[in-house]
Image (spheres, grey):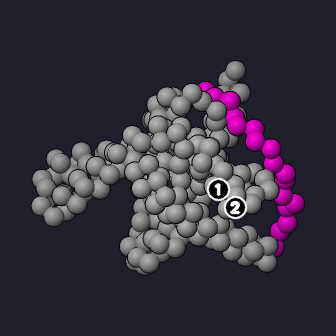
């Protein structure tokens, strides 16, 4: 599936290393980044009054996660604020439909659980939730990775998810893992859960994008 031109924001490469110590160092660095993204996302969301802050905060967080994975030099606070501020309008337009749908799903699930809704309603709710996780999970990394007309991001993310059902399975599994761990330790929601989703979602989708781009080039 052809998506668009990759955003070629400059970066510098990492020097590769191996061994258990390097692995532990990388893991600690990743967790630290998840916590930083978590805090930045909450601050950015609150600054925009939640409704107008969630989109820019999500866009900025995915952009910084992608830049880190590319090896770019980052000054976290300065760069997050710059991305948040400069992408305010576009990010709100791109992510607003997803924010509305997610909000509706939260209320729908609360209603379904409290009122013991019939199984057809639950089945539809599950199907819609899976589709939203698939398309929504692709949308953030796609916004950070590709340069597209803003009206095309959501439809392209949906097409990408539907064209790669196994990608939806991976994203749903990732979301389920984050939700399960957070349910076991609820305090993680405030410290790392959102940042973990953004970071791991970005890593997974960048791999999917690379595989898709390579396949498109082979077919061309």
Q: Residue at x 23, y 53 (%)?
A: 108
Q: Does residue 5 appear anywhere in the picture?
A: yes
Would you say the magenta stretch is mainly helix, strand or loop?
A: loop
Mark 2 highlights which residue? 76
Nearest the camera: 9 or 23? 9
Q: Where's residue 41, x and y in %? A: 53, 60
Q: Residue at x 52, y 39 (%)?
A: 89
Using the numbered discs, state the Cα–Cα distance from disc 1 to disc 2 in whole angstroms.
Answer: 6 Å
Looking at the rendering, which quadrant does residue 20 occupy?
bottom right
Per the image, label 1 sits on a secondary structure element best described as helix
Q: Secondary structure at mark 2?
A: helix
Query: Residue at (34%, 45%) from the top-left corner?
Result: 101
Residue 53, horizontal then vertical, whole percent: 47, 52
Q: Are marks 1 and 2 in contact (CB under 8 Å)?
A: yes
Q: Which numbered dot is residue 80? A: 1
Quadrant where the image shows the N terminus: top right
Badge 2 density bin: few <14, some 14–19, many ≥20, Cα 10 Å: some
User: Within the magenta stretch, is there residue 3?
Assistant: yes
Q: Quadrant of the C terminus?
A: top right
Q: Residue furthest top?
A: 220
Which of 17 and 44 lies nearest the eye of the viewer?
44
Is 130 covered by the magenta stretch?
A: no
At x 48%, y 38%, the residue is: 94
Front-lying residue, 63 or 171? 63
Q: Position of residue 166 (x, y in %)?
A: 49, 44
The percent position of residue 28, horizontal first and vertical second, equals 69, 74
Q: Which residues are magenta?
A: 1-19
Total numbered labels placed on residues in the image: 2
Q: Is residue 174 visible?
A: no
């Amino acid at each position: 599936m052809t998506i668009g031109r990759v955003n070629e924001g400059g970066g510098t490469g990492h020097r590769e290393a191996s061994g258990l110590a390097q692995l532990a160092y990388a893991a600690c660095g990743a967790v630290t980044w998840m916590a930083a993204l978590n805090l930045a996302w909450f601050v950015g969301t609150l600054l925009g009054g939640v409704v107008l802050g969630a989109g820019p905060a999500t866009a900025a967080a995915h952009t910084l996660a992608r830049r880190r994975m590319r090896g770019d030099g980052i000054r976290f606070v300065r760069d997050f604020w710059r991305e948040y501020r400069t992408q305010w309008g576009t990010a709100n337009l791109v992510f607003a439909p997803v924010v509305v749908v997610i909000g509706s799903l939260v209320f729908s699930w609360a209603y379904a659980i409290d009122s013991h809704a019939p199984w057809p309603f639950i089945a539809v709710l599950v199907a819609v939730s899976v589709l939203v996780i698939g398309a929504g999970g692709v949308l953030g990394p796609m916004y950070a990775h590709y340069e597209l007309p803003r009206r095309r991001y959501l439809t392209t993310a949906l097409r990408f998810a539907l064209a790669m059902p196994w990608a939806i399975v991976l994203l749903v599994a990732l979301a389920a893992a984050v939700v399960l761990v957070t349910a076991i330790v609820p305090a993680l929601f405030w410290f790392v859960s959102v940042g973990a989703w953004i970071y791991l979602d970005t890593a997974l989708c960048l791999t999917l994008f690379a595989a898709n781009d390579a396949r498109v080039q082979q077919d061309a």
